Image (tube, helix red, strand yellow):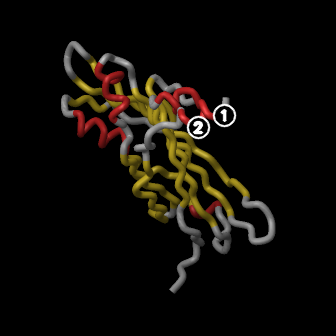
Amino acid sequence: MGLVVAAATPAGADLRISDLDVFLNDHELTVNVSLLGAVPSAFQEGIESGIPAHIRYTIELWQYNRYWRDVRLLARTVERQLAYNVVTKEYKVTSLQGETRAPHVTRDQRDAQRVLSELRSLKLTPAGTMNPTDIIYVRVHAEAALNGENSFVTRMAGTAEQAVRQSDYRTMLRVQ
């Protein structure tokens, strides 16, 4: 039984978090995230037959503690969907959760993938609510799945992938 599970591992995960930037903009802590391989080649046949692809970002703000467990201060989830209309041959990127934006409709697959995979200027929290001497970091968990189904079975079948990345440690005080 263990041999079957070992042989069933996926060929290679294409999903990677390429850029994770944490900024203090306009007195708010903001995050930028970019994914590479948001729509892997294994998804193409499903998308072109009308099955939507989902991307879910879970962004967590953590406080580092030297002698104890780190504390999660907040978590935000942003979910987007990429759907292909077979009749009109258009891609539509829709925000499902965590942000309000108009749907993006295009005929260019690369443009649709770019909009799906870039999360820009996500405001986490006002800087005034945080202790300036705390050491903080951001952890991003990204999931890509056909039809929004991300489980062990779908990851083994190649129709779902996930990636995790953590930012550098930061403080709210300026260090020179």
Give above or below for 112 relative to 15. Answer: above
- Residue at the top extreme, as displayed: 87
Asked if marks 2 and 1 touch (Cβ < 8 Å), the reply is yes
Q: Which mark is residue 2?
A: 1
Regarding residue 61, the answer to whether it shows in the image is yes
Q: Residue at 45% across / 63% down in the picture?
A: 25
Question: Is residue 113 shown left or right of residue 69?
Answer: left
Which quadrant of the figure has residue 111? top left
Q: Residue at 36% across / 43% down in the picture?
A: 37
- Residue 95, percent across and down? 42, 32
Q: Residue at 67% across / 68% down in the picture?
A: 131
Regarding residue 56, the answer to whether it shows in the image is no
Local secondary structure at mark 1: helix
Q: Amino acid at mark 2?
A: Ala
Nearer-the-camera pick, 60 or 44: 44
Q: Residues within 10 Å of mark 2 (few under 14, many from 20)?
A: few
- Residue at the right extreme, as displayed: 68
Q: Residues within 10 Å of mark 1 (few under 14, many from 20)?
A: few
Q: Residue at 57% across / 70% down in the picture?
A: 170
- Residue 171, percent across and down? 59, 72
**Residue named by callout 2:** 6
- Residue 117, percent across and down? 37, 43
Nearer-the-camera pick, 19 or 62: 19
Q: CA distance from mark 2 to mark 1?
A: 6 Å
Give above or below for 16 relative to 67. Answer: above
- Residue at the bottom extreme, as displayed: 176
Question: Is residue 89 shown left or right of residue 78?
Answer: left
- Report the quarter where the N terminus lies: top right
Give above or below for 79 relative to 148. Answer: below
- Residue 2, percent across and down? 66, 34
Local secondary structure at mark 2: helix
Question: Is residue 140 shown left or right of residue 51?
Answer: right
